[in-house]
């Protein structure tokens, strides 16, 4: 059977037989066979253009020097595991969420807490800052994504103004505002992603294609594009067209859950962090995986990844409490950062690239530069 | 069986550590009147990791080793706290029976039997630690009703243990204790407490359903579409990634120190104040010259671009593009009205800011406007973007207005 399926003419003969009045069960089998052979053919086509490795081409550029990256600020205030964080566009404020339901807005530069809200659920795995800086979104085991407008009046009860926007049938794993305060993109343990109108809570578009929990999403950094990438427990990274809801590209090379996806700053590629202890780079134009970032000594999953402004560095947080910094082009590790006393759950570079923030199950957040 | 990949990989490493030829040398150490069987030192572990996992740094080896100890794969024979020390402290391997891959979830009754058994063995080394004595007391209260049953089990186990060879017993006792150090750790803020807890997101997925005929046809369509995709050669893609990164290196604060300093390091916010000012610095202006998107995404860039086009009386394209971007950011409720407004302003017959779109896009847009959605002007916007990119943008970059900004001496301003 394996031989038959690799030869197009044989596939035709095989399918012809199938069409000539076989039972329905066998139709499903032939469809399955056709699907699998097309998939194999796609891998063949992708491999044909693999004329060189990225790190080989990168041999001609200078190696990076020694880095001195230190914790410049430590944010203490969460009473439980920090699960997620996001930067405000003002480059210094952040929002963070934790296992005990607390969502805190900080001025990371001064380390002052500016707002705090307690969600009615635990495990708030997703939080995001609105582009205007005037609101935050968050959600988790409540299966919802809610938006809280941030009041200038510190005494005002934020919880009172809460607006429920997204509704999924399983936990919310990730959320992100689009270029506007008016739309939110969400991913969920129910296997779908969805785009919502904040004002009305209306579902604008849903995205189906993952066969298990979706754990992460990232919007393409383009002024003109309407795409985003998602990754999940089915080990797949999918690229979606926001307008049509279609899955436009798919990559499946990881050996375990993909915990985090992030676009390379030009939008032509994206990186993933996975439970298989590797991070990988996928290029959309080459339509394949173009680099793996791994080491024998790294055996715990990568929970979160983000690029420096130029895309040269990839910061990755791991379940072994460390942050590894990778040279994206040469594929080597340039630094390993210790400091957190438990899993690193989230890593994000600030909007102007001057620092990155890490959040951890040790209840703290750290700003590194 | 819900075994994480990290467990599998750790056990691979442990197996290699126990290899007769290339593993850690295990020995029996003489001490006063007795022998300490089957041990190796903390340094032995660190050295082995450095050599066999190609780790360059002792700190990293120590960190990895500590994580493995916290999972209970090897343990210090004289301490309840499972951590790795790079010195002569003695460690022993855990027996595979107790490995995490067996998905152990021991009950409190099991722990009660164990502690009870310990009290039956009259050996100084088996005396309960304070926290264990406390736990035993709590468990006796909790299981008061079935304590007789627990006692009987403990007795039975102690009887079996007594029959074992003395050396074997020493080893097994320590391994059993280490097992409980993982599952009922000393309540000290340490690794052991947290290794066990897991995120609700990583529960094992149920068996995937068999795909339906409909789903399979969709899959086949998807693969066919993917096969039709145009792909670039790796060499070309690599060059593109290299040149992008090269171009933006100067703007990457991790590669090139920002001017005058990185606020996070120097505690001086001048860098941010300069970025926020309406007077763009040279480096910022230079960036606009890379690609049109750099001008479009910088508010000051957009302003300058618009100003230039207005001076040429050709700003309608940019204004249309900006209006459509704005449209997509509005709440869905406002969309129909805005679509009408944009249509009237830019595309309708006799529009005050008429733009030139190809006939195909124009027809499509005319249709879309009848049932207005956020993407009503998508085709027209794409056409206009291409025009701007090839025409208006290149004129802007060559213009004296832009060149002046680029050459402008940086005005020295004092910020509070």
Image: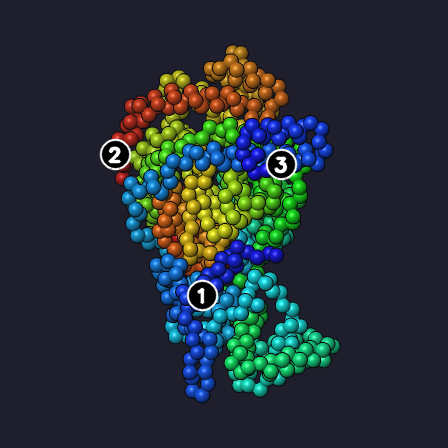
User: In percent of the image, x 47 and y 54: which residue is there?
Assistant: A318
User: In percent of the image, x 53 and y 53: which residue is there?
Assistant: A83
Label 3 with label 2: CB-CB less than 8 Å = no
**Marks 3/2: CA distance?**
67 Å
Closer to the camera in the image, A298 or A74? A298
Instruction: State the mark number for residue A32.
Output: 3
Task: Find disc 1 in the rendering and name its residue.
Answer: B19
- A276, above or below A208, in the image: below
Q: Quadrant of residue B121?
A: bottom right
* Image colouring: rainbow
Closer to the camera in the image, A27 or B227? A27
> Residue B380: image x %, image y %?
50, 20
Q: In which quarter of the image is residue A71?
A: bottom left
Q: Residues within 10 Å of mark 3 (few under 14, many from 20)?
A: many
Q: Which of marks 1 and 2 is nearer the N terminus?
A: 1
> Residue B116: image x %, image y %?
63, 80
The answer to whether any part of residue A113 appears in the image is no
Task: Find disc 2 in the rendering and name its residue.
Answer: B409
Foreground disc of the pair 1, 2: 1
Foreground disc of the pair 3, 2: 3
User: In percent of the image, x 46 and y 21: which residue is there?
Assistant: B384
Instruction: State the mark number for residue B107.
Output: none
């Amino acid at each position: 059977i394996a031989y038959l399926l690799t030869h197009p003419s044989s596939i035709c003969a095989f399918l012809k037989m199938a069409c000539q009045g076989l039972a329905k069960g066998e139709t499903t089998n032939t469809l399955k066979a056709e699907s699998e052979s097309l998939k194999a053919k796609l891998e063949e086509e992708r491999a044909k253009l693999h004329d060189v490795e990225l790190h080989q081409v990168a041999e001609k550029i200078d190696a990076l020097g020694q880095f001195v990256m230190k914790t410049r600020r430590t944010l203490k205030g969460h009473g439980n595991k920090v699960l997620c964080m996001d930067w405000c566009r003002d480059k210094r404020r952040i929002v963070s969420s934790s296992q005990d339901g607390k969502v805190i807005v900080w001025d990371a530069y001064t380390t002052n807490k500016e707002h705090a809200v307690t969600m009615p659920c635990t495990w708030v795995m997703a939080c995001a800052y609105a582009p205007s800086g005037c609101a935050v979104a968050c959600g988790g085991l409540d299966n919802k994504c809610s938006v809280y407008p941030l009041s200038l009046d510190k005494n005002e009860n934020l919880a009172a103004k809460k607006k429920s926007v997204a509704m999924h049938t399983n936990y919310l794993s990730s959320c992100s505002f689009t270029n506007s305060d008016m739309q939110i993109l969400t991913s969920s343990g129910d296997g779908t992603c969805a785009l919502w109108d904040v004002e009305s809570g209306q579902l604008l578009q849903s995205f189906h294609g993952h066969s298990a929990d979706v754990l992460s999403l990232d919007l393409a950094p383009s002024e003109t594009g309407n795409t985003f990438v998602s990754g999940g427990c089915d080990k797949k990274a999918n690229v979606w067209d926001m307008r049509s809801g279609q899955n436009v590209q798919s990559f499946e090379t990881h050996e375990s859950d993909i915990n985090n996806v992030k676009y390379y700053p030009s939008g032509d590629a994206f990186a993933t962090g996975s439970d298989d202890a590797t991070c990988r780079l996928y290029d959309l134009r080459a339509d394949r995986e173009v680099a793996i970032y791994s080491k024998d000594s790294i055996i715990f999953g990568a929970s979160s990844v983000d690029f420096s402004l130029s895309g040269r560095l990839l910061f990755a947080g791991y379940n072994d409490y460390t942050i590894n910094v990778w040279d994206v082009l040469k594929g080597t590790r340039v630094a390993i950062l210790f400091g957190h006393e438990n899993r690193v759950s989230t890593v994000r570079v600030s909007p102007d690239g001057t620092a990155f923030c890490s959040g951890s199950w040790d209840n703290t957040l750290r700003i590194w530069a | 069986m819900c075994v994480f990949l990290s467990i599998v990989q750790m056990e691979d490493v442990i197996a290699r550590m126990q290899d007769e030829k290339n593993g850690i040398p295990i020995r029996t150490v003489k001490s006063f009147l007795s022998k300490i069987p089957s041990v190796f030192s903390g340094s032995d572990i660190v050295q082995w990791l450095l050599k066999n996992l190609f780790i360059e740094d002792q700190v990293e080896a120590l960190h990895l080793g500590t994580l493995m100890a916290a999972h209970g794969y090897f343990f210090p024979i004289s301490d309840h706290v499972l951590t790795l020390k790079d010195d002569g402290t003695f460690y022993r391997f855990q027996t595979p029976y107790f490995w995490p891959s067996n998905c152990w979830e021991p009950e409190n009754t099991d722990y009660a039997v164990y502690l009870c058994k310990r009290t039956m063995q009259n050996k100084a080394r088996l005396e309960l630690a304070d926290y264990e004595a406390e736990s035993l007391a709590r468990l006796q209260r909790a299981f008061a009703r079935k304590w007789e049953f627990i006692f009987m089990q403990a007795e039975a186990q102690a009887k079996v243990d007594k029959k074992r060879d003395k050396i074997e017993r020493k080893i097994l006792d320590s391994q059993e204790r280490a097992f409980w150090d993982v599952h009922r750790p000393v309540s000290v803020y340490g690794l052991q407490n947290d290794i066990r807890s897991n995120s609700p997101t990583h529960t094992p997925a149920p068996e995937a359903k068999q795909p339906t005929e409909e789903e399979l046809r969709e899959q086949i369509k998807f693969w066919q579409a993917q096969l039709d995709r145009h792909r670039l050669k790796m060499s070309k893609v690599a060059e593109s990634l290299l040149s992008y990164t090269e171009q933006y290196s100067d703007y990457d604060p991790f590669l090139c120190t920002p001017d005058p300093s990185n606020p996070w390091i120097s505690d001086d916010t001048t860098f941010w104040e300069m970025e926020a000012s309406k007077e763009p610095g040279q480096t910022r202006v230079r960036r606009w010259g890379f690609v049109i998107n750099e001008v479009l995404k910088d508010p000051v860039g957009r302003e300058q671009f618009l100003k230039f086009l207005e001076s040429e009386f050709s700003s309608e394209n940019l204004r249309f593009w900006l209006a459509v971007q704005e449209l997509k950011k509005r709440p869905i409720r406002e969309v129909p009205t805005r679509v009408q407004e944009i249509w009237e302003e830019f595309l309708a017959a006799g529009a005050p800011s008429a733009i030139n779109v190809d006939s195909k896009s124009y027809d499509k847009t005319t249709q879309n406007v009848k049932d207005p959605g956020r993407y009503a002007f998508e085709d027209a916007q794409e056409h206009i973007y291409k025009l701007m990119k090839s025409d208006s943008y290149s004129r802007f970059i060559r213009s004296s207005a832009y060149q002046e900004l680029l050459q402008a001496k940086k005005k020295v301003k004092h910020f509070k």
